[in-house]
Amino acid sequence: MIRVFIADDHAIVRAGLKRILAEHPDMKIVGEAADGDETLAALEDLGADVLLLDVSMPGPGVLEVIGRLRARQTRPSILVLSVHAEEQYAVRTLRAGAFGYLMKDRTPEELVDAIRKVRAGGRYISESLADKLALDLVSDEDRRPHEKLSNREYEVMLGLVAGQASKEIARRLALSPKTIATYRARVLDKLSLETTADLIRYAIANDLAPSSR
């Protein structure tokens, strides 16, 4: 029996996932959560085998959640579910410790296959993502500027290019607006940019902005 925990801030999505998995007798839903803090707290006590983790939830960002779970002695295999283009989060989530990355527009059959694969210790990625991972093996000197950002800097950058205000990003990542301003300054400095408008243009040019999907 594969024990599955669902972490997604949309109740309709959680209900849909539960309906899909209910059709498979080898799977059992052992819990659900609507934000990062709830997920981390619930998994302290639950013996989940697989965590279906949404990229965009309130509370600690997806990369932080993965990192904190990875530090635990007992942890589930993490399958990230996302509406975001692979270029935005996939490589970073896998590098952080996720076992797979699946777009939410894929079929229920693919979801079930992915769950079984990561539960068995395998990795579930698309062909295009496999190519990106191969490119990720290049030396640090050959990486694009945004690939050298820390995970927190990267999350703040994506929030800014999505048009989110500093207060909104701060609330989502459980940080202060002053801290977000500091991260914004670091991002602009590392990318050799001056304004948020420059950052948005950079994101579009590198397929990182929502409008470039």
Image (cartoon, grey):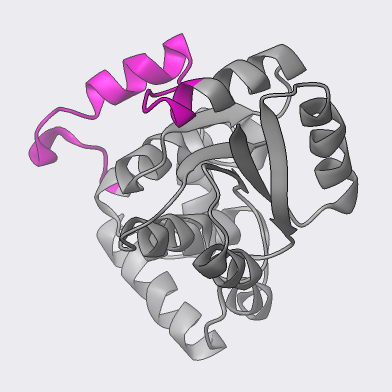
Q: Nearer the viewer, residue 61 or 186?
A: 61
Q: Nearer the viewer, residue 91 or 116?
A: 116
Question: The C terminus appears in which quarter of the rendering?
Answer: top right
Report whether 92 appears left or right of 76.
left
116 to 127, vertically: above or below: below
Q: Nearer the viewer, residue 124 or 184?
A: 124
Q: Is residue 125 magenta?
A: yes
Q: Residue furthest top?
A: 127
Magenta stretch in the rendered image: 117-145
127 to 15, vertically: above or below: above
Q: Quadrant of residue 133?
A: top left
Q: Nearer the viewer, residue 169 or 204?
A: 169
User: Residue 93 location in percent, x, y?
Assistant: 42, 43
Measuring 34% from the left and 56% from the top, which residue is drawn there?
A: 70
21 to 196, vertically: above or below: above
Measuring 34% from the left and 45% from the top, which residue is drawn there?
A: 97
User: Residue 71 location in percent, x, y?
Assistant: 30, 62
Measuring 83% from the left and 42% from the top, which residue is drawn there?
A: 13
Report whether 147 appears left or right of 35.
left
User: Residue 66 location in percent, x, y?
Assistant: 43, 55
Viewer can see residue 107? no
User: Residue 200 location in percent, x, y?
Assistant: 54, 50
Q: Quadrant of residue 138?
A: top left
Report whether 3 appears left or right of 87.
right
Viewer can see residue 10? yes
Q: Is residue 63 magenta?
A: no
Q: Quadrant of residue 147?
A: top left
Report whether 107 appears left or right of 74.
right
